[in-house]
Amino acid sequence: MFAEPSPKTRELLERLNRFFDQHIYPNEARYHHEMDAFRRQGNAWQVSPLVEELKPVARAAGLWNMFLPHPHRDVPAISNLDYAPLCEVMGRVSWSGEVFNCSAPDTGNMETIERYGTEAQKDEWLAPLLAGEIRSGFLMTEPAVASSDATNIQCTIRREGDEYVINGRKWFSSGAGSPRCKIFIVMGKTDPDAPRHAQQSMVLVPRDTKGITVLRHLSVFGYDDAPHGHMEVLLEDVRVPASNILLGEGRGFEIAQGRLGPGRIHHCMRSIGAAERALELMCDRLRSRVAFGRPLAEQSIWHERIAESRCLIDQARLLTLNAAYKMDTVGNKEARAEIAMIKVVAPNMSCKVVDWAIQAHGAAGVSQDFWLAEAYAHQRTVRIVDGPDEVHRNAIAKLELAKRAGPARA
Amino acid sequence: MFAEPSPKTRELLERLNRFFDQHIYPNEARYHHEMDAFRRQGNAWQVSPLVEELKPVARAAGLWNMFLPHPHRDVPAISNLDYAPLCEVMGRVSWSGEVFNCSAPDTGNMETIERYGTEAQKDEWLAPLLAGEIRSGFLMTEPAVASSDATNIQCTIRREGDEYVINGRKWFSSGAGSPRCKIFIVMGKTDPDAPRHAQQSMVLVPRDTKGITVLRHLSVFGYDDAPHGHMEVLLEDVRVPASNILLGEGRGFEIAQGRLGPGRIHHCMRSIGAAERALELMCDRLRSRVAFGRPLAEQSIWHERIAESRCLIDQARLLTLNAAYKMDTVGNKEARAEIAMIKVVAPNMSCKVVDWAIQAHGAAGVSQDFWLAEAYAHQRTVRIVDGPDEVHRNAIAKLELAKRAGPARA
Amino acid sequence: MFAEPSPKTRELLERLNRFFDQHIYPNEARYHHEMDAFRRQGNAWQVSPLVEELKPVARAAGLWNMFLPHPHRDVPAISNLDYAPLCEVMGRVSWSGEVFNCSAPDTGNMETIERYGTEAQKDEWLAPLLAGEIRSGFLMTEPAVASSDATNIQCTIRREGDEYVINGRKWFSSGAGSPRCKIFIVMGKTDPDAPRHAQQSMVLVPRDTKGITVLRHLSVFGYDDAPHGHMEVLLEDVRVPASNILLGEGRGFEIAQGRLGPGRIHHCMRSIGAAERALELMCDRLRSRVAFGRPLAEQSIWHERIAESRCLIDQARLLTLNAAYKMDTVGNKEARAEIAMIKVVAPNMSCKVVDWAIQAHGAAGVSQDFWLAEAYAHQRTVRIVDGPDEVHRNAIAKLELAKRAGPARA
Amino acid sequence: MFAEPSPKTRELLERLNRFFDQHIYPNEARYHHEMDAFRRQGNAWQVSPLVEELKPVARAAGLWNMFLPHPHRDVPAISNLDYAPLCEVMGRVSWSGEVFNCSAPDTGNMETIERYGTEAQKDEWLAPLLAGEIRSGFLMTEPAVASSDATNIQCTIRREGDEYVINGRKWFSSGAGSPRCKIFIVMGKTDPDAPRHAQQSMVLVPRDTKGITVLRHLSVFGYDDAPHGHMEVLLEDVRVPASNILLGEGRGFEIAQGRLGPGRIHHCMRSIGAAERALELMCDRLRSRVAFGRPLAEQSIWHERIAESRCLIDQARLLTLNAAYKMDTVGNKEARAEIAMIKVVAPNMSCKVVDWAIQAHGAAGVSQDFWLAEAYAHQRTVRIVDGPDEVHRNAIAKLELAKRAGPARA
């Protein structure tokens, strides 16, 4: 069968869509009102009452921790191909993932601990994360260097006795804004003189360790994305037990590579969900507005954009599902070209579709009355985080050129 | 399984690729030399000796008439999904299809007769076409009107006793240039007062019927595409027996719709094959040239284009295979959005990739020394024939807007 | 001389650039800190202390009210061509225009009153506006309809005795957020049954008139643009003396047309200034960052974008100056194609250049640390306000097609 | 005055337009028929009877040798800014330039000899060229290397006694196909060990010198561009007197730089003329065709393209005129960024506009019945010749980055 969801996914999908119809879409305004009230009170970094209220409902509906690629204790595994369509739905409402304990960076952090952590690390951090009791942050990007090149990383993780001492400045540390964030995964260098990809390590750093200062949030086109947030974090002589290392010294790059694959499927499918919703909004708006005597929906310029949107969305979805399938069948490493491709294709596509939807809405499109401007800001950012387009295109091109290696033919 | 060829297709594909390696690629220069010699002699409209030579070889290799969607006598059927990858290979060399009796417009004409013809019509015309003994033309487009709107057609098919009398002027009549072309399928109006889509009919018109004049060939960006050709044909009081009608009066539009689906899969997969080859040539050229001290293949501007090409090609292929799968499973009518989408996506994509490949080749890219300029001319034309992009985007958009029907939501 | 500023403009330009170097650029951080402090205090709609501090300095430097196209009392006139380069400089810092009493919508409102107002209206409103003592708002766009078609406007202006009674809902009412905004120009319909372009009128409505409620601000990609603001304003039985009408009943469309020309030159030149600054930031960033062993500034993909930026900026500037020159020499009406063209070209260009600059900055580009995300949000919005791209392209095309009128040639 | 032609140019322009109306447009079909007849006779490389017939008419009308930037004997000079609009007109009909003795590569070759030649060289070659008695070729590009990097050139010019001995293979040698071509300017290396830009020299090589073989023509998207032609030329031990060198050994790069500026203005203005004509054809076609009940000219998708075309054309023209003005006022070297910019902008623009015009014409657009496919082939090639886009963008970017030199600011 071609590009169709498995029966299991189809069932989950139906359940998830029902949940969205009952609990997510009707509460979108409430979510923003609650967060705006926090902002007006001077502190946006508070737990969303709505999300907390919905978590047990989602759990009761069997929509909890659906993302795990390998089974862990009582949490069953799901393949990338099966999970992808669920991500697409969650991409329609940016805050919805947490309701199902399926939001970044927690999903990636949980996968990382599940895959590379010791049993003790799992007991301490994975268990409460899977229970939705705590949240986590991922500290990789640094303000001072082009972090897309991992050898540029300046944060140091120095062994001192049975401790690691961490010094560095991180930013765009997603998730670090939440008051319930209790654990950071920090990428730094244990050995700057090691070979290029063996210099980096990852350590588990409890959020309340001495020496950690969350300095401020970084805004994204004017949005603070609270309470999740993109934070700037200063680490000054932060000490953690040596046992907090993940996998071992010099394995940080390897973990990063392993962790990024599934995360990219998630990101991309969410981008596709966002684009799909934007296209719906675009069609609805165009059907509802009349200018110069005709509904906008009858203008051929909008036919072009609707059709292009449909073509772009469907292609990006097929490409992402194909990458998921390849990861499931031959592994993340063999699928690295496919993963790089979707990382470029999906957010570029969604930026374009959301931008057209904005244009179709006129001034309303850039305002808070529609979800579109916020979606654009987010999708535009996805073209940068986890490596900018240019880095991925470079990787794709090198794999392509390598296929033609051997004596060049003029 | 996702997007992977069936074992049957895989075997055919291997056989076809071997045939290309042995008989097609090594003969590309010979093909052009032979046709150029004919041109210099003043008549390009001659049968290609090379193609005739290779036909029995292909037949012996079991690579003959692979395209038929329904079984006919001893010719087995193939699904659209299974045939698509074979078309992709044939798209790499424009003249290769005829070697396997799989070239347009013969494939479409054979399908049409197989699907809508009487047994007598099949005996007379389908049999020699399947045997590769004769070739055929398809006369639909007219110079005087926008033919993408079938109601514009001006050619008349008038019943007179037990004959039809045909008058009209057609152009871009593909296949009509070949000296072995013996049968035309002609689209015209039997009843201009009937409902919009019941005015048109199709009739079988033997090439040598009185009143037919093949006036000239139309060039495509300077290429004559001989001996196949795109001809202008005048039909003056052309009389054929009433039994030559296909399916019945007023059924022409219906046949056109039925015939176009598979033909579009073929066109699109050939476009994908052309793009794939252009990307290979691009990589090879860039690897072989040095400017300002570095191989062009190390320039990041070319990395962008190579990566974009790979992303665009893979997406277009998945979209086309998905359309083929949908046609196979739910029928051409249900798959009309998918068919319209690939008709827009595939040739636009291949134009872009071939154009980049031309740029990578410098002046050589526009010359006869590489296949690229010819490929561009052909791919650019595909964006117009069988309905220009605008008509298909319009159709896609209307289907998309219809999904949102019901009270419009602002 | 071609495309070079007049000696007068050159002198003003030098003075203005000096002022920016001394007083504007060094205070950009302070401006944002002050406004952010207001936001944290719960009310962003306060007068900027910095801007107030700089106004007398600008006035003393002879940089005050430079924009007026016709002389008014002691304020000298300036041609569109001469004023344009000054706008370009002001486009580099979004809040700078007010320092020179040259910010929208005040400039447009002042021009409108100067051009179409009575002496009494000038005494009451133009004088304090030119003195910088009060500010103004412009209420045209409505949330319920496609306002780009002026016949859609629903706000009613009903004559009752010697008063007008105004009812309507406006939004994206620029300038209405300022606590010093004292006067609105309101567009509404005095006669919905009049010919298409004689239905609308404009009236002067003091901000503190009974029945006016400023409901809320509209955000633009998450920015509130305080204290200027884009407000939603409810007008319920708002009564003003009949003498507050501008030019006369049914002249609203005519005023809108007359007012828009110069305003568009200003908008477009500011867009060009923004793009020019973004290109500088892009170059600086690329020169300062190293990835995979080479400065980003040596990557040919960035050469492409820098070169494209330069080509796009210079072309948009020439086109805008050409439109200014045409307005100055043959009038706004004769220059309507040129004005429509720059309205499409300039913000599209600046969106593209700013977006590339964002990409060059990585995550920093979307954050508050650089002016880029804010600039993007603003430039993107310019593609919608004062008529979306589509409306202007439509107007340009109709003028172009009209040039070819007469018997169509096939 | 801004962007308006001088009175002198206006007068010449009127005369030239009148000439086109009387002698060029009415003869376009005849030109093609005559050349096609030659092709059918087996030799397209013959002098056009039409062009020969029109030359004395043009001369009598005072439209002869209008291009010369410096006066030479009785030929007056014209500035780049004044000549540019004339080039635009000539760009509307590809073969028209020769009628006025204003066609490439003769104009560039004449300029080169005028500027860098000795009096003896001028007597021998410039005089008959200015008289239109002979034609010339320019041999620079080579098939074996990326010729955009002049250091790649492999053709050798070896001093031997009082002769130079030339060996090399050139292609895309424009003008070398004409039977009246009597003189080549050949670029080669006199000293491969000299500094990068002092290795190259240019020599005058009479076409009938022993050792010269014109091997074949290179086609451009299927067009032979006869009788002008793009030829492949073999030079084997070709001997010319040492006095045939231009300017001196090692000065070839310098001459190339000097010669290219005006040539690019010509190319670009011709591209603009081609685009302008394509836009006219597009409008005419759209006004004449009806599909699905409405003239194509009423479809908003075509409004977009018409408007974009107008915006792109006007911008490219202003940019080119600005470059011409700058060359006239500060010299070719100071204007090198402007020259590089137009070389990128103009043909890219014209490719886009011509391509839209093709799409508007349906299948007719790619055929010989309209001038469009030929125009596209030519404009596409201009993006490659005289340096591909990438080389010019690179140069522009380096100049832009250099403006920001000094300590990089993050």
Image (cartoon, coloured by chain):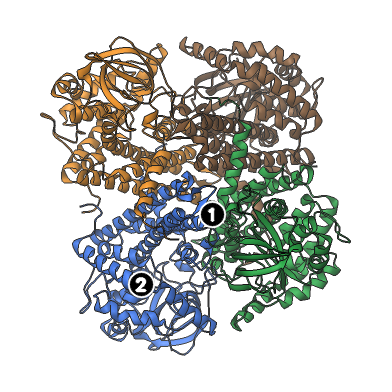
Chain colours: A brown, B green, C orange, D blue
Residue holding disc 2: D24
* Residue type (three-letter) at the residue carrying disc 2: Ile
**Residue found 20% across the figure and 22% down from its top:** C129
Q: Quarter holding the N terminus of chain B?
A: top right
Tell whether B102 sits left or right of D217.
Answer: right
Q: Quadrant of residue D107?
A: bottom left
Mark 2 lies on a secondary structure that is helix
Residue holding disc 1: B299
**Residue found 23% across the figure and 13% down from its top:** C161
On screen, residue C229 above or below A147: above
Q: Is residue D61 visible?
A: yes
Q: Nearer the viewer, mark 1 or mark 2?
A: 2
- The chain letter under disc 1 is B
Percent x, y of residue A150: 59, 38
Label for residue A115? none
How many circles with numbers are drawn on the protein? 2
Name the one closer to the observer, C408 or C134: C408
**Residue found 67% across the figure and 38% down from its top:** A317
Percent x, y of residue D184: 40, 81
| Residues at discs 1 and 2 both on one chain | no
Name the one closer to the observer, A63 or A333: A63
Kindly give the residue lying farthest to the front in the view shown: B161
**Residue found 79% across the figure and 27% down from its top:** A77
Q: Quadrant of residue D345?
A: bottom left
* Residue type (three-letter) at the residue carrying disc 1: Gln
